Image (tube, rainbow, N blue to C red):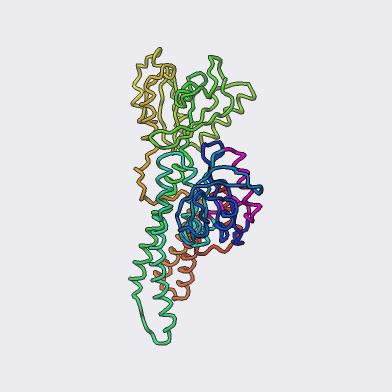
Amino acid sequence: MSILNDHQTICALATASGGAIGIIRVSGSDAITIVDKIFVSTSGKSLENVAARSVLYGHVTNENGTTIDETLITIFRAPHSYTGENSVEISCHGSDFILNEVLRLLIRQGCRQAFPGEFTQRAFLNGKMDLSQAEAVADLIASTNKATHQLAMGQLRGYFSNELNELREKLLKITSLIELELDFSDQDVTFAERSELLQLALSISDKITLLTQSFEVGNAIKSGISVAIIGKTNVGKSTLLNKLLKENRAIVSEIHGTTRDVIEDTIQISGINFRFIDTAGIRQTHDEIENLGIERTYQKLSTATIVLWVIDMQPTPDEISEIEEKVKGKKLIIVINKIDRNQFTLPIDTWAISPTVILISAKYNTNIPQLESAIYQAANLPEIRENDVIITNIRHYNALTHAQEGINRVIEGIHLNLSGDLLSEDLRECLHHLSEITGGAITSNEVLGTIFSHFCIGK
C-alpha cells in the first residue's frame, strides 16, 4: 500500500462480522456527496445541507429504488473528523448481505475499498495524530488486559509524544547555541558555556536511558511474561497447567513421557498476561521422540523469565545443582506437588536455589491461588498507570537506542572540547532518530506501508 494520499474517497466495514449492528465508514472529500446518492432521509433533508456531527435517520436504497436497510447516518466535516477529511458513518443492521450491499453501492458511486489501516494513515498524514499515536490505535485494538489497554491509551493521548517533544526542545536549544557560535566563529563570540551544554546533554541522555530501560517491562506486558513449567516425568506438570488454564489443555496420564512436545497457552493474573509453557519431563530415556521433546524443554527454558520447578519428592543434590545451573538469571519458584499424598520432612525452604517454595495439590486445586500470587510477584512489574510512559514498540526502542548513541557522542565531544561543527552533526543525528518515532523524519513509503499494513481494515 502506498502512503501517498490519492484523495480518493474510501469506504470499509468498521465493525466485526456477526453483530447486531454494523458500521461502515466513508472518508474523503466526496464522502458526503457519495452517501447522499444512496440515502433517503425521512426528514427529506439532503446530507449536503446538514450541519456537521448531525445524525439522520432514513433508508439506503439501491439503483432500482429498493430499500436495502433502515440506517442512521452520522456526518463529520473536515477537519473535525478522525481522518481530518469529510467522513460519514453508516449504522446498519449487522446482516452480511446488507453490509456487503451497502459497500457495493458506495463503490458503484465512486468509493474505493480502504486498505488495512488507511483511515488511521490518513489521520496521520492530515496531522490529526503523530506516528506513535497512530501505532497506539493498533495497540489499543489488540489490547487484551488492563495493563496493555492503559499503556495504549496513554500513548494515544500523547504522553509519549510530549516526552519526545521536551527532548526535542532541549536538543534544538543546544543545536541553536552551537550553530550560532559557528556563524560568529570569526568574532570569537560564546553563546553558551560548555558546562551548560554538558548539563543539557546529560539531562537528555538520562531521559532517553529511562525510556529505553522501560522497554523490558513494556515488552513483557505487551507480549506476555514467559513461564516455563519443568520437572521430571509424572510429577504433575500437565495437571498444573490445566488447573492454571482452567481447561484440559494438556493430556494427563500415569504413563511416563506423555508430554513429548512443548504446549503453550496464555492466562491473565492480576491483569497481566503470562505465557505458560508445559515441557516434556526431564529424564534419561532411549525414546528418540521423547529426547527431542526434552531438548525443546531446555530451549524453552532458556527463553523463560519465570521457571516453575515441579517436584513430588525430595530431589537429590545433583538434581538441585543441575536446575540451579539451568535457571541462572531467572526467577525460580519451587512447586512441591501432590501434598495430598506426600509429606516432606526435609527443610525445603533452606535451599539456596530459591526463596520461594509453594506446596500444592494440582489434582485437588490446593494452593493454586497462592501459586498464582507468587508468579505475579516474581514478575516484579511496577504498578502501571495510564500516564506512565513505557516503551512497548521495538521500532521506538531501536530509534531511542540510536538517539542515545548520538547524544553520548555529544557528551564525549564536549569533554574532549571538540569543535562545534562535529557536535552539531551528532546532535542532528539524535534529533533525526527521535523524529523517526513521531514521523517527523519519515520519508519512506515502505516504512509507513509496513506500519499501517498491520492494522485491521476499517481502522
Q: Position of residue 190 (x, y in %)?
A: 36, 80
Q: Quadrant of the N terminus?
A: bottom right
Question: In the shown orientation, is residue 69 left or right of residue 367?
Answer: right
Q: Is residue 269 magenta?
A: no
Q: Vertically, is 148 above or below 389?
A: above
Q: Vertically, is 68 above or below 402?
A: above
Q: Position of residue 354 (x, y in %)?
A: 38, 31
Query: In this view of the protein, which residue sits in the foreground, 86 or 123?
Result: 86
Q: Which residue reaches farthest top?
A: 341
> How many numbered markers are drawn?
0
> Would you identify the image quadrant in which residue 188 lies?
bottom left
Q: Which residues are magenta?
A: 95-120
Question: In the shown orientation, is residue 449 left or right of residue 174?
Answer: right
Q: Position of residue 194 (x, y in %)?
A: 36, 73
Task: Identify the main secondary structure in magenta.
Answer: helix
Q: Is residue 102 magenta?
A: yes
Q: Position of residue 301 (x, y in %)?
A: 51, 34
Q: Vertically, is 298 above or below 27?
A: above
The residue depicted at 41 percent of the width and 75 percent of the height is 176
Question: In the shown orientation, is residue 242 left or right of residue 198?
Answer: right
Query: In this view of the protein, which residue sits in the foreground, 329 or 318?
Result: 329
The residue depicted at 41 percent of the width and 67 percent of the height is 171
Q: Vertically, is 192 above or below 57?
A: below
Query: In this view of the protein, which residue sits in the foreground, 256 or 445?
Result: 445
